[in-house]
Amino acid sequence: MSNVKQKTGMARLMQLTRIKKSLIVGSVIFAALASIASFIPYIAIFFIIKEILGTLPNLDTLNTAVLIGFGWLAFAGVVGNILLYFAALSCSHFAAFGTLYQLRVDFAAHLARIPLGFHVLTGSGKLRKTMNEDIEKIESFIAHQLPDIIAALIAPIVMSAILIFVDWRFGLAVLLGVVVALVVQMSMYGNKETKAKMAAYQKTVEEMNNAAVEYVRGIAVVKAFRQTVFSFRRLRNTIKAYTDVVIPLTFSWKNSFSAFVTLINNIYLFVIPVGILLGQSATDYYSFATVFIFYLIFVPSIAAVLMKVMYASSSTMKVQSGVAAMDEVLNEATLSQPAKTTTITNYDIAFADVTFSYSNSKNIEALAGISFSAKQGKVTAIVGPSGGGKSTIAHLIPRFFDVSGGKITLGGIDVREMQTEYLMDQVSFVFQDVFLFKQSVLENIKMGNALATEEDVVRAAKAAQCHDFIEKLPQGYNSIIGTRNVHLSGGERQRIAIARAIIKDAPVVVLDEATAFADPENEHLIYKAFEVLMQNKTVIIIAHRLSTIRNADNIVVIDSGKVIEQGTHDDLLSAKSKYQNMWEAYTKATSWKMERKKVVANA
């Protein structure tokens, strides 16, 4: 592991700008030149004032050609400032768009490489905010704020040089006012308390996003039980927490912000006393008046310069919080990859004393000493009480997580010795929680095999018993899922997912409650399809409906993260095992029916 400490704050922002270095350099140069050009009109005004006062009281001797020349110089400064700033923004925008694209691609790629456990433990609302809002802030920083920051850094230098050059005494008076204003600004943004409040603000925004996404997803339940937003405790608490943070943060700036704005808009109050003192002893009144008037005209421009500095500081602080949130995700360790993948020729799966925990704590294990094998061409069923670890086993096979102890082999090779792309090619999954993209039915099924033809898709759909209902959709296989009049039931979505797995035609098939939403007729048809399409494949079925796995070649019973028994259906029943108890409870549940009993009131 590298011992190089990762950069943070402004240093990290500058590091990100190197993605499009040449454009950033161009933007910086143009922004600096634009900032210098913005002061040219003031220099021209100084010479115009000097020219006019130098001819008093005989204005007839005024050289209009010189005045017009200085006027054109002022105009050139304004135009130059506009053109140079436009060039700076053009470069920065091109750099920002390229950086945004690269960061989002890298972020999405990293999300695909980190263990699924991270996604399980991290809310989608937080990741959505990070990928959209926080990375978007970096784009805004590069496109707009970076040129402004450069201008905000160059402007005070040029401004100070002009102030001191024209008259160092007035210059020092103005700079004193600027220093006082900057000290007030630092007290507003630079102290630890404000930084801590800003970090808390970012955290509460993430939590509120998370809770809001969860609330929207569960809106059907909220409405069904006549609940309101205030009864959805988590969302209500996050909104309250956000309010509790943002209001004190805002009010913490009221005094310092008011003082800062007052100071920068009234720096002439530092100039006037000096002007009075110098005027009393002035021997060349016209030279004194020229300088004094120039400073009174020039001083208001300082407010605009310092406001840019303030907004740049404020915006940069927000961007840095966003970058920190992005880096927090990017610092999540990815699954290790072998330098070269090991290929396999058979597809037996074996769990050898596997232990696994979702957290770093070894005291809370989801699986403890799991050992069993699933042979190629056979169906292995995993059954057991809810929370026993069945789905965890399904997730470990394609290495959605790394085991804490022991090993899982495919074809005799540890799955950790296979590159992720190769391992994914060997396994098809159908999970209970089906996710379909807002794309056409055809494209959703082709997720299993991008090279599949339309005929292949139809063949897989027929095998998964979903061809008939697809044909009834408004545009058939080209209907966009989730759009108007294209809404699928749970069972229909499940069968599309099964078609996706069928068309992939991988040698290992993992079904986690694949028929959870299917009615009895379609469940039978789906399993008939699997009998044909999954010959010579390694099939692992996670099942709650015990009737669906009666004919499995091996049934592994899991309880509290341990294998307590395994065998065929008949073997386990004859052994008077835990499975037998589960089977009896299941058969009683399937034969249960609701009866109405007459209740006789007590006399």
Image (cartoon, rainbow, N blue to C red):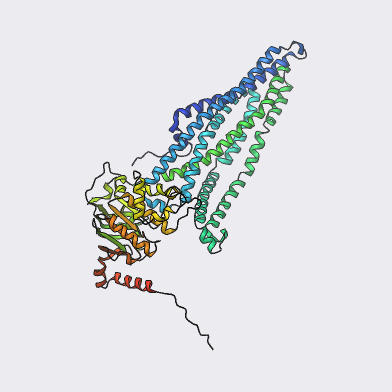
Q: Can residue 161 be seen in this view?
A: no
State whether residue 129 is above or below residue 15. below
The residue at the far bottom in this view is 603
Residue nearest the viewer, comparing 347 with 444: 444
Quarter of the rendering occupied by the C terminus: bottom right
Q: In which quarter of the image is residue 539?
A: bottom left
Residue 120 horizontal/vertical position (percent):
41, 54
148 and 350: which one is in front?
Answer: 350
Label total for image: 0
Q: Which residue is pictured at 56% across the width and 54% down the height?
A: 239
Q: Residue furthest right?
A: 57
Q: In this view, does 13 lie above or below 111?
A: above
Is residue 39 or residue 162 the one in the foreground? 39
**Residue 136 seen in the figure:** yes
| Left or right: where 291 falls relative to 19 | right
Pick the front one: 304 or 266: 304
Horizontal arrangement in the rendering, residue 304 relative to residue 431 (left or right): right
Determine whether 443 is above or below 237 in the image.
above
Where does the N terminus fall, quadrant-wise?
top left
Q: Where is residue 528 in the image (x, y as percent from the top left)?
A: 31, 60
Q: Which residue is at the far top?
A: 61
286 vs 167, left or right, is right
Residue 144 found in image quarter = top right
Residue 272 x %, y %: 71, 28
Image point (34%, 40%), residue name: 2
Q: In which quarter of the image is residue 303?
A: top right
Location of residue 132 with respect to 404 vertically, above or below: above
Which residue appears at 50% of the width and 34% of the height? 142
In the rendered structure, the answer to whether residue 139 lies left or right of residue 344 reads right
Looking at the picture, how far across and down is residue 61, in whole percent? 74, 10
